[in-house]
């Protein structure tokens, strides 16, 4: 262990109990589960959802909102993922009030922020998402109303974080939204996953021709060709887990000559 830099103050805690954290989820009645993709093929599926703590009913106790998002496959089928608002019961337990609140399915939610955008004294909820954010106005009676269009804050890209703050000091909170990568459900990227079988095979040399958008370096939306370097392993196989966006043509003698695999 390296000694501390000169001038660094050394602070030791003596005679104090080290705090410990205990998992009390079961006792609280919170049963929320965030939907996750088994394969996590696309970036939105590899990201966990945000959690928001706020006193939505102003009773002096923090409540919890969990964001959720469907997998890409679910979204393409028009299926939604249910978020959840849990009301604090003041006794260490929570009650799911999502149905009454009306904020179950804002979209492919990633995170959010809380702020009283209309200065009515009630905390409003802004949810960031892929393809369109949502602003929920707190009605003060345990329910919320979607006022996104009216407020003009849908955004529409791949939003992740957000924050309310009165940057110009006019007495009304302003909204800052951060966006992530350029990702669209109607223009999914192509990709490959390489796996290594237990049975050794000779090295495979693949020539790849892209017919769609791909994250592989050197590919573009135009039709281009790229050759892989020889595998550092003496065996290789390809596992394809994408949509019909590109083709592989194998020039390996151990496979069918000039075999083309579209995926």
Image: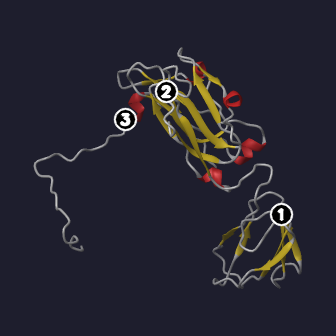
Image quarter in which the C terminus is found = bottom right
Q: Disc 2 marks which residue?
A: 86
Image quarter in which the N terminus is found = bottom left
Helix, strand or loop under label 1: loop
Of residues 5 and 43, the one drawn nearer to the viewer in this rendering? 5
Q: Is residue 216 above or below residue 149?
A: below
Helix, strand or loop under label 3: loop
Q: Is residue 221 above or below residue 131?
A: below
- Position of 56 compared to 234: left or right? left
Counting residues from the start of the chain, the first of labels 1 and 2 encountered is 2
Spot occupied by residue 203 in the image (x, y as percentages of width and height): 71, 84
Q: Disc 1 marks which residue?
A: 212
Spot occupied by residue 122 in the image (x, y as percentages of width and height): 50, 21
Helix, strand or loop under label 2: strand
Q: CA distance from mark 3 to mark 1?
A: 48 Å
Q: Is residue 147 above or below residue 208?
A: above
Q: Name the quadrant containing residue 91.
A: top left
Spot occupied by residue 226 in the image (x, y as percentages of width and height): 79, 78
Q: Does residue 23 appear in the picture of this structure? A: yes
Q: CA distance from mark 1 to mark 2?
A: 43 Å
Give the mark toward the camera: 3 or 1.
1
């Amino acid at each position: 262990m390296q000694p501390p830099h000169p001038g660094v103050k050394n602070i030791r805690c003596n005679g104090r109990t080290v705090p410990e954290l205990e998992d009390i989820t079961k006792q609280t009645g919170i049963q929320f589960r965030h939907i996750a993709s088994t394969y996590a093929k696309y970036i939105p599926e590899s990201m966990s959802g945000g959690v928001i703590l706020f006193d939505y009913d102003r009773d002096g106790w923090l409540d919890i909102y969990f964001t959720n998002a469907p997998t890409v496959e679910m979204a393409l089928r028009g299926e939604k993922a249910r978020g959840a608002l849990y009301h604090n019961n003041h006794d260490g337990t929570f009650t799911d009030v999502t149905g009454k609140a009306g904020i179950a399915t804002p979209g492919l939610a990633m995170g959010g922020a809380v702020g009283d955008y209309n200065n009515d004294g009630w905390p409003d909820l802004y949810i960031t998402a892929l393809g369109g954010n949502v602003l929920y106005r707190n009605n003060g009676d345990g329910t919320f109303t979607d006022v996104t269009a009216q407020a003009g804050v849908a955004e529409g890209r791949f939003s992740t974080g957000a924050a309310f703050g009165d940057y110009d000091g006019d007495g009304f909170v302003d909204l800052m939204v951060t966006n992530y990568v350029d990702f669209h459900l109607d223009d999914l990227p192509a990709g490959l996953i390489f796996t290594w079988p237990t049975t050794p095979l000779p090295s495979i040399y693949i020539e790849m021709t892209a017919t769609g958008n791909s994250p592989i370096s050197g590919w573009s939306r135009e039709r281009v060709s790229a050759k892989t370097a020889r595998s550092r392993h003496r065996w290789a196989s390809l596992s394809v887990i994408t949509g019909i966006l590109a083709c592989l043509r194998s020039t390996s003698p151990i496979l069918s000559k000039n075999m083309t695999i579209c995926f």
